[in-house]
Image: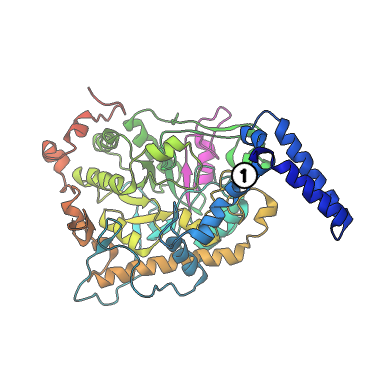
């Protein structure tokens, strides 16, 4: 009889409130509830509401509140995904300039696989020059760029709101690091404060496309030669949804977004799954060389989440055969990012950052290209320890997206794709963006980046090394189980220089090297 309990309860409550309660007008509060219960009983779409009128709606209430109750009441410091509470707290503390020390020892289980460690030295290094940066741009580049050790990863205007973009760029300006535009184009909010820009070109060529959606070299040249644009990045894939295109529905294509992307206001904005400017590895590196020329000699690189290994080798072979060099490669991890994606893509496609970074490092080193082609890591990094790990795996610098969102005040409500971000970061709603004060948040962005890079230098000194680029795989150890651990170079394979050219059959990925062709992304049979 529970299913009909709502009716007598409501009738009794209404009677009590109306005739014996302190205020007869409260009857008006119960009549609507009685009507809702009656509607639930006769409607045909929801079984629970039909069987348990009104009462079933309480379930929806708790479902809506569940993420917030869990995050603020139930969740322990080491719980919470994608970022644990302790990780978010560290970012918040550094962004606000608060104390970021932790008392009473680590909360990690040091005998489980959640613990990994860098090897410190009995003789820590003396103070070194902490202003050192990464020189990006080889002999074919006439305007090289000196990149910071931590930069803002790709987040598009449209994915983030105008004030968030503005605050990130002002923070990058104040802290002297770069801000990647994401594939959504270079908006007025990226330009407003003059922070260094890496312009990302996706398959939609937003900001440099013709009416048919193809690459327009004239429009590209006009933007790329701006002094604020320091590097060009060709997006081949992203960790959130590798191999997948995207559609920004017409109603979300505002006048500002349309002007930034070079599309029609109110019409669907489509990012194809594949590029139309090239179809083979050779065409890719030739197009990169053309972009470098059109930009006035600025560094040009690619960003990708590693998928089929032979395709990475195909790009290496294309660089060797043509003599054209990419200036850098950014490896994105399958850990995902700010962009919404189909669940199957988020959970089941793409190589995680650690394996992907090692593979691309091995490809560059094995082909003797690492000295010319810089390597960057992008995937969930939020701390100096994370930066140190990436250096150990071969990265010259790291990029972060979600960590910088936290520095803006993001609370991980997971509403990024709904336009209902409560902190005004990932929304185009002017009312919600009102809460984001650009000058205040820009200072937080700068403080977080500076404190995190400083932590990397502290770790480097504790290891007895002079620079983060001296951190090697043997300096990093991880657990295999509760009783065994080993250094990373004894767990993963790290190739010696030139091995793919001199003795490719000796490496574990020899089959992928044989499958790779400079003239096609398809595997050789």
Q: Nearer the viewer, residue 450 or 339?
A: 339
Can residue 379 be seen from the camera position used here?
yes
Task: Specify the segment rendered in magenta.
Answer: 197-225
Residue lying at the far top of the rendered structure: 525
Q: Residue 327, how many percent across, how many down?
A: 34, 47
Q: Quadrant of residue 364?
A: top left
Q: Nearer the viewer, residue 289 or 348?
A: 348
Check if residue 232 falls in the magenta segment: no
Q: Give me the residue at 48% from left, 36% from top.
A: 342
Residue lying at the far front of the rendered structure: 1
Scheme by which the image is coloured:
rainbow
Query: Would you call the spot at circle 1 few (<14 residues within 10 Å), some (14-19), or many (20 or more)?
Result: few
Q: Judge whether 85 appears above or below 357 on screen.
A: below
Q: Nearer the viewer, residue 422 or 361?
A: 422
Label 1 belongs to which residue?
Answer: 60
Q: Give me the residue at 54% from left, 52% from top.
A: 67
Q: Residue 503, how many percent across, how many down?
A: 11, 39
Q: Judge whether 211 appears above or below 165 on screen.
A: above
- Left or right, 183 with respect to 38, comes to left
Q: Judge whether 395 appears above or below 209 on screen.
A: below
Q: Nearer the viewer, residue 300 or 409?
A: 409
Classify the position of the N terminus by image quarter: top right
Classify the position of the C terminus by image quarter: top left
- Left or right, 422 with respect to 246, comes to right
Q: Give me the residue at 55% from left, 40% from top.
A: 207
- Left or right, 101 with respect to 25, comes to left
């Amino acid at each position: 009889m529970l299913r009909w309990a709502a009716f007598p309860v409501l009738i009794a409550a209404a009677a009590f409130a109306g005739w014996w309660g302190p205020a007869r007008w409260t009857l008006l509060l119960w009549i609507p509830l009685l009507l809702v219960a009656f509607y639930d009983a006769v409607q045909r779409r929801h079984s629970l509401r039909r069987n348990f009128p009104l009462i079933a709606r309480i379930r929806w209430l708790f479902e809506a509140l569940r993420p917030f109750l869990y995050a603020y009441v139930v969740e322990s410091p080491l719980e919470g995904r994608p970022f644990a509470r302790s990780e978010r707290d560290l970012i918040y503390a550094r962004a606000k300039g608060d104390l970021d020390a932790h008392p009473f020892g680590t909360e990690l289980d040091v005998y489980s696989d959640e613990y990994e460690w860098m090897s410190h030295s009995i003789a820590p290094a003396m103070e070194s020059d902490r202003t050192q940066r990464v020189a990006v741009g080889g002999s074919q580049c006439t305007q090289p760029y000196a990149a910071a050790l931590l930069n803002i990863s790709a987040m598009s205007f449209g994915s983030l709101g105008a004030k968030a973009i503005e605050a990130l760029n002002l923070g990058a300006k104040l802290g002297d690091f770069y801000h990647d535009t994401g594939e959504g184009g270079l908006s007025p909010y990226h330009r407003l404060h003059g922070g260094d820009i890496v312009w990302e070109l996706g398959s939609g060529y937003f900001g440099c496309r013709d009416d048919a959606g193809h690459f327009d070299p004239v429009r590209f040249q006009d933007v790329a030669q701006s002094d604020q644009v320091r590097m060009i990045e060709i997006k081949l894939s992203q960790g959130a949804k590798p191999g997948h295109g995207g559609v920004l529905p017409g109603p979300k294509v505002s006048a500002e977004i349309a002007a930034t992307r070079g599309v029609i206001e109110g019409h669907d904005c489509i990012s194809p799954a594949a590029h139309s400017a090239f179809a083979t590895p050779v065409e890719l590196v030739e197009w990169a060389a053309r972009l470098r020329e059109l930009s006035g000699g600025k560094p040009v690189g690619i960003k990708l989440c590693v998928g089929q290994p032979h395709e990475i080798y195909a790009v290496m072979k294309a660089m060797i055969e043509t003599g054209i060099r990419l200036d850098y490669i950014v490896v994105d991890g399958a850990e995902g990012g700010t962009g919404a994606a189909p669940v199957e893509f988020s959970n089941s496609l793409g190589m995680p950052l650690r394996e992907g970074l090692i593979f691309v490092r091995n490809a560059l080193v094995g082909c003797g290209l690492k000295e010319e082609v810089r390597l960057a890591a992008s995937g969930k990094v939020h701390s100096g320890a994370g930066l140190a790990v990436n250096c150990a795996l071969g990265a010259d610098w790291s990029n972060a997206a979600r960590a910088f969102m936290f520095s803006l005040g993001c609370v991980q409500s997971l509403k990024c794709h709904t336009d209902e971000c409560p902190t005004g970061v990932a929304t185009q709603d002017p009312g919600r963006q009102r809460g984001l004060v650009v000058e205040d948040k820009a200072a937080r962005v700068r403080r977080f980046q500076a404190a995190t890079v400083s932590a990397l230098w502290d770790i480097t000194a504790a290891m007895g090394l002079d620079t983060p680029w001296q951190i090697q795989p043997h300096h990093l150890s991880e657990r295999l189980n509760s009783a065994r651990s080993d250094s990373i170079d004894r767990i993963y394979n790290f190739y010696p220089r030139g091995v793919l050219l001199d003795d490719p059959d000796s490496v574990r990925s020899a089959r992928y090297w044989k499958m790779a062709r400079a003239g096609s992304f398809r595997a050789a049979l």
